[in-house]
Amino acid sequence: MKIALAQLNPTIGDLQNNAQSILEIAQQVASQGVKLLLTPELSLCGYPPRDLLLNTHFIADMEQTLNQLAIDLPSDLSVLIGLATPNLNSTITGSKPLFNSIALVTAGKVQNIFHKRLLPTYDVFDENRYFAAGSEANWFILDGIKIGLTVCEDLWNDRDFWGKRSYLVNPIEELAKQNIALSINLSASPYSVGKQQVREAMLKHTAIKYDRAVLYVNQVGANDDLIFDGCSLGFDRSGELVCRGKSFDRDLIIIEFDETKQDLNLDKIQPLNDSTDAEIWQALVLGVRDYVQKCGFQKVILGLSGGIDSALVAAIAAAAIGADKVWGVLMPSPYSSEHSVTDAIDLAANLGIHTETIPIGELMQGFDRTLDSLFTGTEFGLAEENIQSRIRGNLLMAISNKFGHLLLSTGNKSEMAVGYCTLYGDMNGGLAVIADVPKMRVFSICNWLNREREIISQNIITKPPSAELKPGQVDQDSLPPYEVLDAILEAIVCNHQSAEQLIDRGYEPQVVEKIIKLIKRAEFKRRQAPPGLKITDRAFGTGWRMPIASK
Amino acid sequence: MKIALAQLNPTIGDLQNNAQSILEIAQQVASQGVKLLLTPELSLCGYPPRDLLLNTHFIADMEQTLNQLAIDLPSDLSVLIGLATPNLNSTITGSKPLFNSIALVTAGKVQNIFHKRLLPTYDVFDENRYFAAGSEANWFILDGIKIGLTVCEDLWNDRDFWGKRSYLVNPIEELAKQNIALSINLSASPYSVGKQQVREAMLKHTAIKYDRAVLYVNQVGANDDLIFDGCSLGFDRSGELVCRGKSFDRDLIIIEFDETKQDLNLDKIQPLNDSTDAEIWQALVLGVRDYVQKCGFQKVILGLSGGIDSALVAAIAAAAIGADKVWGVLMPSPYSSEHSVTDAIDLAANLGIHTETIPIGELMQGFDRTLDSLFTGTEFGLAEENIQSRIRGNLLMAISNKFGHLLLSTGNKSEMAVGYCTLYGDMNGGLAVIADVPKMRVFSICNWLNREREIISQNIITKPPSAELKPGQVDQDSLPPYEVLDAILEAIVCNHQSAEQLIDRGYEPQVVEKIIKLIKRAEFKRRQAPPGLKITDRAFGTGWRMPIASK
């Protein structure tokens, strides 16, 4: 039996176009003799639909779209489609009003509706907010083959693999007892560094443990802060990888399930990225491209400071939507070094992006004069530094508003963590492209990017990072070296370590205490930051929920 | 038996000081012959602790603080203290690693730990993110009296009262079967308009239905966007109100449980506010005061436009922390009307707040000149309007940064809904005071405020609302009248109604479609807004989780 895995890139809530994408692929594969088409979790509305799910008319529209799609689909093809469906017993059983469901559509009709059983409610996931858990093992028989069905998280609770349970039930185990011939998992699993390796190990383990072939289809594309990497997979019953979809791109895999062997035949295996830097680069390029397109922008702008962060973001943007659609804006001040301007101009030339140069000295003087009487007798300090950054932020937004281009912000995760950024200044933008990329990783991605030719000049990479908001300023005046900072930040932010644990590991108590204080104090800035593309297990985004007024 | 209800105002995460507050009250009531002291849900760490709960060292610190407190507390007093405790079976049962617990402390020891059973996971609540649900009915015997214990949401699932179940179990019903003599509920129930009426009706219903007296202790104080109103309650077994704590203030109630009657005796009943306007006013005053104090600020600043929104926020701030600690900043432009300045000055004089006047005309010209070549041939529009707003935002932040005062933002809910506000401009601030107050309610609160003497002049209240970002501009140029706008917004934002439903109710299709489009388009602005004090069932804050890139 031929099975197709459609690695789709839906737009959240865009039911008509998402349905159209499914229809087009269905028509294509039906003509190739495919019997079963798989689409990702919630493929009709896209993942995550978030509070759109609270609108009952949205749920009704989804059902209507599914019913129309069922009529339109080729009648000799079975299709699995993800959507939210009403939980009709909700008010009697006291459970949430929706299910995260998969519809099995064949011959013009919805033949069956299956419900996701394990509902992730941690990090960026809020599924218990919306969904009731399905209580039955999900399977169906097609052409005499008994197929078990799980949805994303359903697969992620094997106690042997994880050494612990995260949920009481294990849907995969229950399906194995049902004597299924093939296991299918429909997912919308967001990207983070190293996650694909975990998925492959877990799927391999599952295949071997239950002696069943397993197919996994993942959503691809970015929705706000979340990037879905695709990389759909198949493992045969001996645990050998038999297919892998493209990473960070749409794909369609057609694979043969051999009924005699009760196993999948070997198919095409797309390579993974050969380095973490390459992988993150691809993720961010997709993140920018999809945010721009799904929000309906044509072009982007960003401030080019001559520093490494804006250089990387400019390169990502150029790769995402084309250099001709990227505007770099240079806004030198009297504190800007000569090389800031030349480095930025050189970079723009390397990338082939348009630049504008708007000196801000006069506006700085204007603010000085305007605030002169009020600030009399005070010393130049943070307030004056921030004024500069906010003048730039205002200019960038003015250009964004005037021409309708999306402003990208360029701060990295290390800065966001310690608040080394100006709210309403350099933090301005619709999307924070590298907000989840630690500074040391910024360096290494830039070096990777230069592997064939120098795109980001060595000068930009090697000069001491500086905000250039006062003469001679460099980041390391007020922060520990980035090697140290990033290691401490990872321990605190991602691994929930305490000051004591870090000090035990040999870090200086003063440095640790200072960083903890800075992280806490910057919470109000992060709360007002634009969405930032998530690439780590713990980003400062929808999955970071910290109080501000706290001790 | 004398029972004390401590309506406490904890600071999130401030274990030492929160414990100290409990200790002081315990010492006070022990000397008055009280046998049992009740404190709110999570009284040790404050509610909601949010992702602080993910730090295992925070959980360990909490346990340690509890153990020390147990030793320090008067040994003849029993105290119920709220804290998060580890779920030791988490990895075996596949449940979350914590419980939302209540410790019963007597005679220097933790005698028992009870676990919350119903975990709200909707709106601003994320309890399934952190907590496993307790599975047993919670009760204990003190001086021969069997006392049933529930935690906040545990009380909110009576099918007779609500006409539906929201959870499978009903802890109150289970406790009634245990033949308890008295029901105690420890809560951290956030304020919203009309909620106290619901609580009182529900508690009355519970008392009558089970023929048991019931005591309810609520947290008071504001934590970021959430305001807790206190208003702790007691109902006797016939459903009569026997005590009510203060609203929006700390309080201590000592009430007698008569062992012969097996009922509560009548005690002091604090009045509720006599109008919704008064109630919201009190809520916002507390919200500002607590945010300022808990974040460690001394003073606040805000832009005074001469309009009604900033007038109300200035009045709230003056009431919250004292007029001498409020700075109003006037930033007139060439488009500002004469009355803007005089109205703002009059208001400041009425309130007794300090003002600064900083004209922005020169800076506007500076931006015009700076952007002249780039903007050549374009018409004056939104970009130029926003520049003005962002100049003001920059000046306000400069003053905030220079003197360390908290900037309050002044936008109302109607503006936030349709995006009639400038990101990085008038949206700037650490706290958005009236971000959940619809414009029509702003008018009515101002009129209420003037009930004895004119604080906000009639001129401010009656003049047509205007952003004054271009000559002759008024809000109603681009928005429907606020009566209409607010009604439509409430239907869409709070009641999840669709365009069809609104059109069926008689609203003009064009107006409805326009507003829906504006709401959707402003999502990126709201994502970057400061925390806004929540006063309605559905605010644009932590409980509003909408995708940006969507259709």
Image: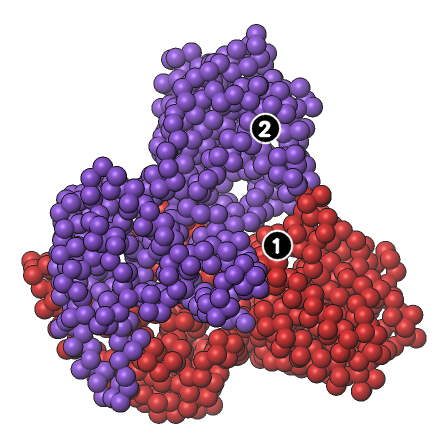
Chain colours: A purple, B red
Q: Where residue A526 sits: x, y (%)?
A: 41, 62
Tag 1 near tag 2, CB within 8 Å: no
Between B111 and A346, the residue placed more toward the observer is A346
Is residue A106 toward the left or the right of residue B63 in the image? left
Chain at numbered mark 1? B
For the view shown, which residue lies furthest in the top direction? A260
Q: Which residue is drawn at 52% across and 47% down?
A: A125
Q: In which quarter of the image is residue A250?
A: top left
Say if labels 1 and 2 share a chain: no
- Kind of residue at disc 2: His
Q: Which residue is drawn at 53% across and 53% down?
A: A495
Q: Where is residue B457 in the image (x, y as percent from the top left)?
A: 35, 86
Q: Is residue A174 above or below residue B302?
A: above
Q: How crowded is mark 1: few (under 14 residues within 10 Å), some or many (20 or more)?
A: many
Which corner quadrant of the image does residue A133 belong to? top right
Q: Name the residue under label 2.
A: A205
In the image, A113 versus B38, the foreground residue is: B38
Say the numbered circle drawn on residue B130.
Answer: 1
